[in-house]
Amino acid sequence: MTGKKTRFVWAEEQQKAFDEFKKIIAKETLLHFPDYKKPFHLYTDASDVQLGAVLMQDGRPLAFFSRKLTGAQKNYGVGEREMLSIVE
């Protein structure tokens, strides 16, 4: 569908595949309720412009977090930004 000489076509077959893909993605990102008897896993990351995190349990997401860095925080070193993402 992306070649220079290929004509772009969006028919029923492509729409069905797209709808199925959306269902799979929605199912994987659906938030779940925590079980306080099981361990939690916190995954964080920090880029040059924002922070992000996901709290998971049994491989399922419980919560998502993201926000942009302030002007001063953009000057932090990599380690400081990563620690900030954990603290946030």
Image (tube, rainbow, N blue to C red):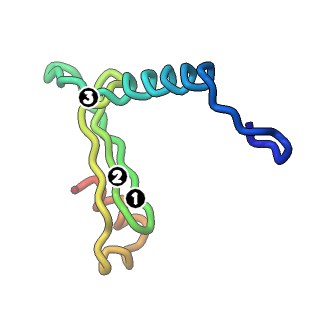
Question: What residue does disc 3 label?
Answer: 31
- The image shows residue 29 at horizontal and vertical percentages of 35, 30
Q: Are marks 1 and 2 in contact (CB under 8 Å)?
A: yes
SS type, badge 3: loop
- The image shows residue 5 at horizontal and vertical percentages of 85, 44
Q: Amino acid at mark 3?
A: Leu
Q: In terms of sequence position, does the residue under pointer 2 or pointer 3 come before the other? A: 3
The residue at 30%/34% (across/down) is: 41
Q: Quadrant of residue 37?
A: top left
Question: What residue does disc 1 label?
Answer: 46
- Is 68 drawn above or below residue 25 in the view shown? below
Along the line of sight, the residue nearer the viewer: 21 or 10: 10
Q: In terms of sequence position, does the residue under pointer 1 or pointer 3 come before the other? A: 3
Q: In terms of sequence position, does the residue under pointer 1 or pointer 2 come before the other? A: 1
Label 1: few (<14), some (14–19) or many (≥20) C-alpha neighbours in 10 Å: many
Q: Quadrant of residue 38?
A: top left
SS type, badge 1: strand
Label 2: few (<14), some (14–19) or many (≥20) C-alpha neighbours in 10 Å: some
> Of circles 2 and 3, which is in front?
3
The residue at 29%/59% (across/down) is: 67
Question: What residue does disc 2 label?
Answer: 52
Q: Amino acid at mark 1?
A: Ala
What is the spatial separation of the Cα atoms under label 2 and label 3, in whole angstroms? 16 Å
What is the spatial separation of the Cα atoms under label 1 and label 3, in whole angstroms? 22 Å
What is the spatial separation of the Cα atoms under label 1 and label 2, in whole angstroms? 6 Å
Label 3: few (<14), some (14–19) or many (≥20) C-alpha neighbours in 10 Å: some
The residue at 44%/68% (across/down) is: 48
